[in-house]
Amino acid sequence: MRSTIFTVAVLLVVSTGMGLGQQSRTDAQKYIGAWAGSYTSDGGMTNKVSFTLKKDEKGQWGGTVKWVNDEGEQAADFKSLQIADGALKGTVESPDGQVVIAIDGHLEGDHLEGTYAVSPKGSTDVAERGTWKVTKSGQSSAQM
């Protein structure tokens, strides 16, 4: 369960971003697409994470996060995602709906990196924390 929570949190962190608002199409292109890398819990566990970021015709951010944990490959859609001024902020809910992962990050050269925090759904208590780092892929979808 702890490993699942961590994995979901990492994915959430990776997937989440802040709304672009008045951001230009060129700026949005920096983020749109597939990203792949890894996450590491504060407890030292490291595994794969990837996400696909997209922006719809209304200018709203969305996407999917995939991660690997003790239970295998997992995937979830962003519940919220904002991207603005080089910063990401978002949330992802675990596939079983029991935890929410808050993700914060920033664009650093050709990669995104940041932190995540996993909390039981409906609680502000943090069950797990960690860091993540992903690099944009030249492919149309994230590969793990």
Image (cartoon, rainbow, N blue to C red):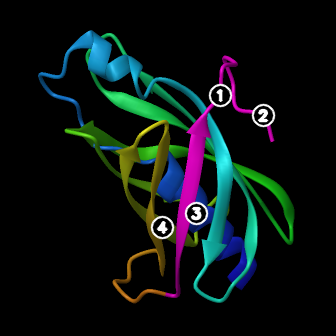
Whether label 1 touches label 2, CB < 8 Å: yes
Which of the 4 image quadrants contains residue 107? top left
Residue contact between numbered discs 4 and 3, judged by CB atoms under 8 Å: no
Q: Please rate how many residues cluster around mark 4, counting C-alpha atoms within 10 Å: few if below 14, some from 14 to 19, many from 20.
A: many
Q: Is 86 situated above or below 9?
A: above
**Where residue 61 sits in the image (x, y, percent)?**
36, 30
Give the spatial CA distance, label 1 vs label 3. Answer: 18 Å
At label 1, the amino acid type is Ser
Marks 1 & 3, CB-CB < 8 Å contact:
no
Label 2 sits on what residue type?
Gln
Residue under label 3: 10
Q: Give the percent coordinates (x, y) of residue 36.
A: 66, 42
At numbered mark 2, what does the secondary structure look like: helix, strand or loop? loop
Distance of label 1 from label 2 (alpha carbons): 8 Å
Q: Quadrant of residue 96?
A: bottom right
Q: Is residue 64 above or below residue 141?
A: below
Q: What label does residue 143 carry, if any?
A: 2
Tell which circle, 1 or 3, labels the residue nearer the N-terminal end: 3
Which residues lie in the magenta part? 127-144
Q: Is residue 74 magenta?
A: no
Give the mark, 2 or 3, whose residue is nearer the N terminus: 3
